[in-house]
Image: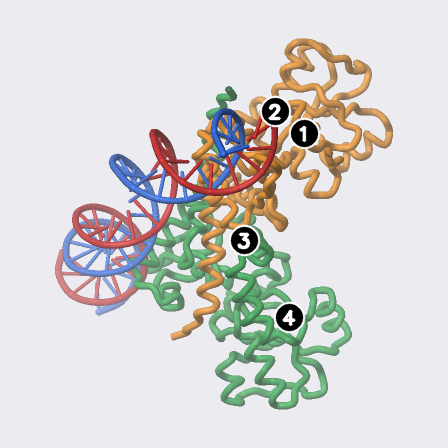
Chain colours: A orange, B green, C blue, D red
Amino acid sequence: MNQDPPKKRLYESFAAIARALGHAHRLELLEQLAQGERPVEALAQRTGLSVANASQHLQQLRRGGLVAARREGKNVVYRLADGPVIEALAALRGIAERNVAEAREVMHSYFNNLDSMEPVTRAELMQRLRDGTATLLDVRPEDEYRLGHLPGAVNVSLSALRGRKFKLPKNRQVVAYCRGPYCVLSFEAVRLLRERGYKARRLEDGFPEWKAAGFAVQGP
Amino acid sequence: MNQDPPKKRLYESFAAIARALGHAHRLELLEQLAQGERPVEALAQRTGLSVANASQHLQQLRRGGLVAARREGKNVVYRLADGPVIEALAALRGIAERNVAEAREVMHSYFNNLDSMEPVTRAELMQRLRDGTATLLDVRPEDEYRLGHLPGAVNVSLSALRGRKFKLPKNRQVVAYCRGPYCVLSFEAVRLLRERGYKARRLEDGFPEWKAAGFAVQGP
DNA sequence: CTATTATTCAATCATTCAATTGAATTATCT
DNA sequence: AGATAATTCAATTGAATGATTGAATAATAG
């Protein structure tokens, strides 16, 4: 009744992007890339994939326009593409939170229990940083911190926290963040810090969300 | 190195949602549903799918948490689910616009040529409606209009426009809208109206985007 | 130029997905 | 209750996807 081939072709393109998002490994790769750009081998290591497999998935992401790559000496360095990639991931998360029983269950049974502590909002953090009533703590591994972090953040990785190799003021509240809403590092960090007598809370969202909002300090 | 099964399960859920978005037919079904709720047969007709096929795709969308359904007499009426479904579609569109060569080509060769006329923005429309310097025109079929439309909008479907069965003030600008950014109805309507001496422009976005922003008048 | 390292390509096999068909459900009407 | 209409289920087929392996390509160092 309504022949509309150009529209159909557009929807094919949109669907292809969605399919590129349609695999857990690729979402993990995107989470890693949301921290900063990386060569293939580093991504493979962090996601536990073989190099060949990671490479294939990265190419699917590239065909979908979700990541871009450039060669740098021997390495091919991947990064998130321009455009609303973080927003697409956030939308998937939002839909899962509301409507997917399986996801709701995981979130409530696992993350909500860990987080009896409600997270610090963006506005609250800004206020506290201006007042100097909070120390901002980046608990990701040091290399991720170096690739970019929030302004004023101190980097003490989770392993350093465990090893007690750190020094933080005890009188001010510590606000910890990591990779994103479903990154467990900051949950664990808050637990550890509280055990040791700190006043610690999590930041809502992680580094990528703040970066997308324009608040990140970029590394070299 | 970093065993994290709950996170993995979450990403599986997110990926399942993305896969549910990963087919052109399902995106078309979502576009239809973004206009308003509908029983299966109506959706099948509008998308040109067999009823059985439409039903299968709708069930995949339901499993993905993208649509919801309720029974109403003999019919099962589907609607968009709560949550950022429109936002997810918008993100796919945005990524395609920026990064997917095929999509850029279609958009520029087809839509941009039609639209030498730049669209009316949200803010501009609001202003003009307050001033009374514009007539807002909904060019979708009458049944879609009845399911919900923008406040103050007059419904003259494209076929009615073609048949000259309408009456609009010639001294005020006409702002036409339809189903969304890639719905061609409003492009065609503006062309027709201009041929006949009206001052006509398109509204940016379509009904679903405005509805998501809370501006729609809902039908019965 | 050769060796080395990082990444990609090509081929394979098992799994999953899409469309079609006809039968089975579920609700209404008489 | 039995007939009818709308939707879903179940089973089939052919096509696409994902993981693995080993070979091929690029860039660099010696």
Q: Which residue is mark 4?
A: B203
Left or right of B26 in this view: B162: right
- The picture quadrant where one finds residue B203 is bottom right
Q: CA distance from mark 2 to mark 1?
A: 8 Å
4 or 3: tag closer to the N-terminus: 3
User: Measuring 74% from the left and 32% from the top, which residue is drawn there?
Assistant: A150
Q: Position of residue A89 (x, y in %)?
A: 56, 43
Q: CA distance from mark 2 to mark 4?
A: 44 Å
Say whether mark 3 and mark 4 are on the same chain. Answer: yes
Q: CA distance from mark 2 to mark 3?
A: 32 Å
Q: Which residue is mark 3?
A: B92
Residue type at mark 1: give it. Pro
Q: Which residue is mark 1?
A: A119
User: Measuring 70% from the left and 38% from the top, which residue is drawn there?
Assistant: A210
Please state which of the two labelled residues, at mark 1 or mark 4, is closer to the viewer. 4
Where disc 2 sits, the SS reads loop
